[in-house]
Image (cartoon, helix red, strand yellow):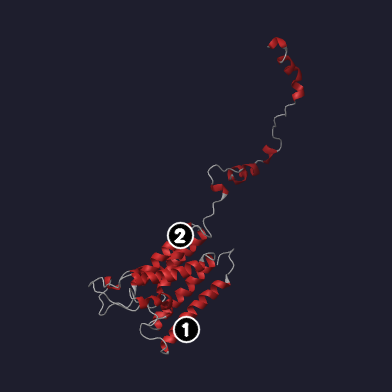
Amino acid sequence: MFKHDSLNYKAVIYAAIMVSLMWLGYLFQHIGLLEGCSGAIIPLVPAGLKGVIFSPFLHGNLEHIFGNSVPMFVLIFLLFQFYPIIAKKVFFLGWFLSGFLVWLLPPIDILTGNFNYVCIIGASGIVYVLAFFIFFSGVFRWNMKLLTISMLVALYYGGLIWGMMPEELFSTLAAPSRISWQSHLSGGVIGILMAFIFRNIGDKKKKFIWEFPNYYSEKDDKLWQDYKEAHPEDFEELPYRKKENIWDRLDELRRNDSPENH
């Protein structure tokens, strides 16, 4: 944590709530309360629209939910810790807009051109929204503190960018990939757009007074200050211009104002 930043406990609570709801949804699946495509996004199918809200709470297996839980907790915490003013807008808009965009994208197999009507579940779309928002917000604002957070996100989650492309492009699969690159791509795009839209809200780059082109202060001139410190005798008795007294020039002014000078 940065020196002057205090821990925002709400950020921890919000992150814990979201991850807990994800595990609760997985529990409902495990005990059979939710089956098949119930609660999933089904692209271009009206019944699949409800998945925009419910799909982040559903996961295919333990590996799937574990893979989303850790980045979800970390990224929600970073969002509410460093962007508290806009955190809720970013989170919920990112959630709904990315899910709706996934629903709008036709599920086309890029190799065969066939339509694959699949059920899309998981919270990875929101993970991509948050990761791309946090990274690009630091870049757009050019704030050193936020840029540091951006670099940390890029370091730990930089590999996410490969998930935005179909897995079939990089390997030969015996069966169609179960990874929804559409969710990842939608999340990344929405995250970047919101980082740009909200770039002027909250923390941004601070411009110090010495960054202005016409600024000069003797106190900031190190060479001058060093000289004054090394040669104090030069500043003991500085010559000053004597203040002019108008009464000392009264006779001169009278002569200049006499009739013969007109």
Q: Residue at x 74, y 21 (%)?
A: 249
Q: Amino acid at mark 1?
A: Leu
Whether residue 22 is visible here, answered yes or no, is: yes
Among all residues in the image, which is located at the extreme top?
A: 260
Quadrant placement of the C terminus: top right
Among all residues in the image, which is located at the extreme left?
A: 112
Q: Residue at x 42, y 62 (%)?
A: 193
Q: Position of residue 229 (x, y in %)?
A: 65, 44
Q: Label 2, label 1: how many angstroms apart (C-alpha)?
A: 33 Å
Residue under circle 1? Answer: 24
Whether residue 159 is visible here, answered yes or no, is: no
Residue under circle 2? Answer: 197
Quadrant placement of the N terminus: bottom right
Given residues 243 and 17, the one toward you in this image is 17
Q: Position of residue 166 (x, y in %)?
A: 30, 71
Q: Position of residue 6 (x, y in %)?
A: 59, 67
Left/right placement of residue 38 relative to residue 255 reads left
Left/right placement of residue 124 relative to residue 237 reads left
Badge 2 local density, few (<14 within 10 Å), some, or many (20+)? few
Height in image: 36 above or below 9?
below
Give the image quarter of residue 5: bottom right
Under circle 2, the secondary element is: helix
